[in-house]
Amino acid sequence: MQAVDYELLERQVRGLLEDERDFIANAANFAAFVYAELPAINWAGFYLPAPDGLVLGPFGGKPACSRLPKGQGICNRAFDEKRTVVVDDVSQAADHIYCDSASKSEIVVPLMVNGEAHGVFDLDSPELARFRAEDQAGIEGLVAAFLEATSI
């Protein structure tokens, strides 16, 4: 797989979001941008806090699980632990929730503002071990640019 220029993508994200602060508008454009620009991705989107767990937000890709029950799934783990979670093989993760059987690996980045999680940004890939350390750093940078541009 070709190397991803995350610095260029981050500049493009900042340009895309520079004149808008609305969360839904920015989340929709951000998810669509990441879905379109990153190779070997079959889903990119947000899950947001709800009383019973996490609820689906803006995304790019096939229809997804609408709700992720509290305490279940990789997205809830990243949200609860307030840290990025990378899973190289979702079939080996006991807490993985299958929304698309084509997904083989996953990265989930919590939306951290002032030490609190306000949701997660989730990426799935049809390739095993798709997300390396440089991808984690790059995707975390993209999420940080999204958060800087967006009112939460």
Image: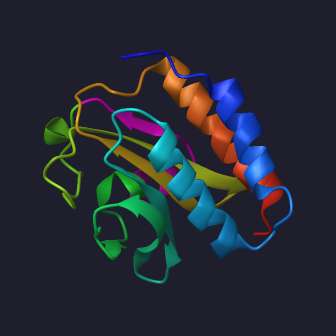
Residue 147 location, quadrant: bottom right
Q: Residue at x 35, y 64 (%)?
A: 71
Q: In the image, is 8 to the left or to the right of 55?
A: right
In depth, the one of 25 and 137 nearer the eye is 25
Q: Position of residue 121 (x, y in %)?
A: 52, 53
Q: Residue at x 53, y 22 (%)?
A: 4
In depth, the one of 66 and 27 nearer the eye is 27
Locate the C terminus and report the quarter of the image it occupies. bottom right
Q: Residue at x 67, y 72 (%)?
A: 25
Q: Residue at x 44, y 39 (%)?
A: 85
Image color mode: rainbow
Locate the N terminus and report the quarter of the image it occupies. top left
Residue lying furthest bottom in this view? 51
How many marks on residues?
Answer: 0
Q: Position of residue 120 (x, y in %)?
A: 53, 57
Give the vertical position of 42 relative to 86 (above or below): below
In the image, residue 14 lies in the stretch drawn in magenta: no
Residue range highlighted in magenta:
76-88
Residue lying furthest right in this view? 19
Q: Position of residue 115 (x, y in %)?
A: 74, 53
- Asked whether residue 151 appears in the rendered view, the answer is yes
Q: In the image, is 4 to the left or to the right of 40?
A: right
Give the vertical position of 56 relative to 40 (above or below): below
Q: Position of residue 106 (x, y in %)?
A: 34, 41
Q: In the image, is 87 to the left or to the right of 4?
A: left
- Asked whether residue 115 appears in the rendered view, the answer is no
